Image: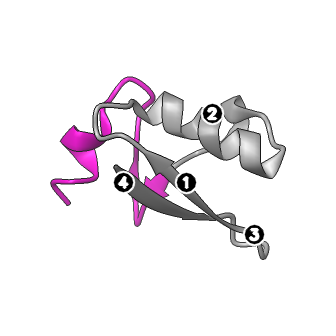
Amino acid sequence: MLEVTCNDRLGKKVRVKCNPDDTIGDLKKLIAAQTGTRWEKIVLKKWYTVFKDHIKLQDCILSI
């Protein structure tokens, strides 16, 4: 079980628990359920790397 912290740079910081075999799209849906925004509008990035929806968390976040 992973705990991912997301910041929208406007004052909202959300912690979401998810599994390593979930995709980025699943993570966006979990974040959208807590923040109230549509999941299609959420862009997850770390520095200049934008994460695509079909990639699994174990492939991108655990390797960074």
Q: Label 4, on which residue?
A: 2
Side (left or right) of 35 relative to 19: right
Q: Label 3, on which residue?
A: 12
Q: Which residues are magenta?
A: 45-64
Question: Do callouts 1 and 2 mark residues in contact (Cβ within 8 Å)?
Answer: no
Question: Do callouts 3 and 1 mark residues in contact (Cβ within 8 Å)?
Answer: no
Mark with earlier residue (3, 2): 3
Residue type at mark 3: give it. Answer: Lys
Colour option used: one colour
Q: Position of residue 17 (x, y in %)?
A: 49, 51
Single out the mark in the foreground, 3 or 1.
1
- Residue sitting at x 69%, y 72%: 9
Q: Is residue 63 located in the magenta-colored stretch of the structure?
A: yes
Mark with earlier residue (4, 2): 4
Side (left or right) of 59 relative to 35: left
- Relative to 8, does residue 59 appear above or below in the rendering? above
Tag 1's secondary structure?
A: strand
Question: Do callouts 3 and 2 mark residues in contact (Cβ within 8 Å)?
Answer: no
In 3D space, how far apart are the residues under numbered discs 3 and 4 (Cα atoms)? Answer: 20 Å
- Residue sitting at x 37%, y 31%: 22
Q: Label 2, on which residue?
A: 29
Q: Is residue 52 located in the magenta-colored stretch of the structure?
A: yes
In 3D space, how far apart are the residues under numbered discs 4 and 2 (Cα atoms)? Answer: 15 Å
Question: Do callouts 3 and 4 mark residues in contact (Cβ within 8 Å)?
Answer: no
Single out the mark in the foreground, 3 or 4.
4
In 3D space, how far apart are the residues under numbered discs 3 and 2 (Cα atoms)? Answer: 16 Å
Q: Position of residue 19 (x, y in %)?
A: 36, 40
Residue type at mark 2: give it. Answer: Lys
Side (left or right) of 58 relative to 22: left
Q: Label 1, on which residue?
A: 16
